[in-house]
Image (cartoon, grey):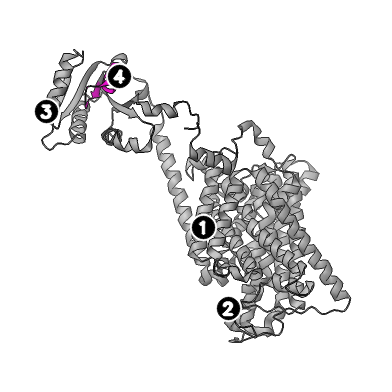
Amino acid sequence: MSTLGDVFKRLLVGRPMRSAQLGETLLPKKIALPVFASDALSSVAYATEEILLVLSAGGLALIHLTWWAACGVAFLMIVVVASYRQNVYAYPSGGGDYEVATVNLGRQAGITVASALMVDYVLTVAVSVSSGVANITSAAGSLQGHEVGLAVGLVLVIMVLNLRGLRESGTAFAIPTYAFMAGIAVLIVVGVFKLSGGQHLTAESATWHYRHVEQFSGFALLFLVLRAFASGCTALTGVEAISNGVPAFKPHKSRNAATTLAWLGGIAVTMFMAITAFAIVSHVHVADRASRLVGVPKGEQPKTVIAQVGAAIFGGDHTFGFFYLQTVTALILVLAANTAFNGFPVLASILARDGFLPRQLHTRGDRLAFSNGILLLAGFAIVLIVAFKASPSRLIQLYIVGVFVSFVNSQTGMIRHWNRHLPGETDPARRRQMQRSRVINTVGAIVTSLVLVIILISKFTEGAWIAVVAMAALFALMGGIRRHYDRVRVELAPTDDETMLPSRVHAVVLVSKVHKATLRAIAYARASRPSYLEAVTVDVDPADTEVIKQEWEARNIPVPLKILESPYREVTRPILDYVRSISRQSPRDLVSVYIPEYVVGHWWEQLLHNQTALRLKGRLLFTPGVMVTSVPYQLESSDRLRDDPHV
């Protein structure tokens, strides 16, 4: 009979899958695109808004610079996509940036990349879900004030879908992703049609004006534009996920991953530039808080940029087109977290394999997904959402630092990769291809390094320092875990001493009463044929001890009974002292302690039994030269669980 917990688990994640079914979870390109690219595709929904929010500090006079910042982001996207296409061919094993950096730049660089990516994956979930909730509340004002609860609930839903398996979650997420792409495509077509027909697009915020405007010129203006560009670089988050997920593609894996990456770059750049152009044409104005805008209706919050663009193109915020766009935008933003749910567990599994994270993260769960990594990611994301009250504007400041750290290390590592392999390549065609790839990766390394510097300078005091501190802490933690595993491996390395038999085996059976459990433990100890065998009890109550002595003699048990004095009525300490004294007297002897234990069928019965045995076992395990053996005795209540394979 299955337990209630097991039934609930089966309802949530489905039936277990055999390891041989792993091939059934591999993804075709049409499913891989929404699985791995939803983060990058969804970023177009708020990347333009982040640029406008920064430039709003200078008022309407600086809004025209939005286009230049957007062009810089688009160029960077093309460079990064082209660079990562080289990665997926050179390193198809799924290690992604971590593997590239480790192989070519060394372990420290690899851990740096891994720390950055893991922090960024957590932030991806928190930012994407919070942004999705913001779009939901833009369309449904009655939900305002419940953002945290909505965001936490959505993270849990995505977590459960991923626990059910990659292929299943990919199919579930494909429809919303393609629906979003279709919605943006219709938005572009309708917008271009209206503009070509001479119609004017006017956002609801076109007549609003900024208050508390600052004057910028010279270096201050340059810094502001660079900060706007850095904020717009959120559009690049998630590009690296495909290089981490190459093993999840169907054969030919590298080619399919590179094709999907090219699709991602083309679609994301087109959508981002189109939304930015429409935002500029329709005079969308946004600010970090409503009080900075003059003209906002009392009691209302400004809509997101994509919501205002949708309302301007589709003819208002009560049209079908507007509601469709808001719905699919909210869905894609929420489901963009799925990119992290696919990247984080795989990376954690590889790090666990290499000894930088706990081993439990390396194994797959019932549905062939890395369940422990999925649960860990969801937990960290929920903590961030609650701590920052599901505010995208606050969370976004922590964002993209990690992804650009990994970009820089990855592209630098790829340059080293080509430099190592070029001298040994004799085929002219292959050499030309490798040289072309090196040029692409060199451009990528230079550009992403410059952007990383810009991001650190412009965003550090705005909250990016938190991400940097988190990366440093994770770096130190992973280094400590690796040192621990290395130390344990050295300690466990076999020597000749382990193959030598002990001089003698001194067996001790612990006795609390003379009953079936005790007699079974004695019989088992005798069957093991130790050099010396004795039973030991502690004299806590003289009357009880006398009863034990009488029953021992009456049953004529062929094992000597030793009674340990305990003037303070302790049980654990006298036994520990006695066992240690045996070990000290004969260091080459092995002391084997047999502890009778009850096997029960209810959790509350466990509280009533075995407590002394558990304490003794826990202390004896730390004593060198002592082996501890639990001898189970099954009580009747254990019958209900005996034939249950799920226990």
| Pointer 1 residue | 382
| Pointer 4 residue | 520
Mark identifier at residue 543 = 3
Q: Position of residue 377 (x, y in %)?
A: 53, 52
The type of residue carrying mark 3 is Ala
> Which of these two is toward me, 59 or 366?
366
Q: CA distance from mark 4 to mark 3?
A: 24 Å
Query: Relative to 607, is 187 on the left or the right?
Result: right
The type of residue carrying mark 2 is Arg
Crowd around label 1: few <14 · some 14–19 · many ≥20 (10 Å) = many
Range covered by the magenta-colored residues: 507-524
Disc 2 secondary structure class = loop
Disc 4 secondary structure class = helix
Q: Nearer the viewer, mark 2 or mark 4?
A: 4
Q: Tag 4 or tag 2, which sits nearer the N-term? A: 2
Q: Is residue 497 above or below residue 267?
A: above
Disc 3 secondary structure class = helix
| Quadrant in the rendering for residue 391 | bottom right
The type of residue carrying mark 1 is Ile
Query: Relative to 637, is 616 on the left or the right?
Result: left
Crowd around label 2: few <14 · some 14–19 · many ≥20 (10 Å) = few
Q: Tag 4 or tag 1, which sits nearer the N-term? A: 1
* Disc 3 and disc 2 in contact, CB within 8 angstroms: no
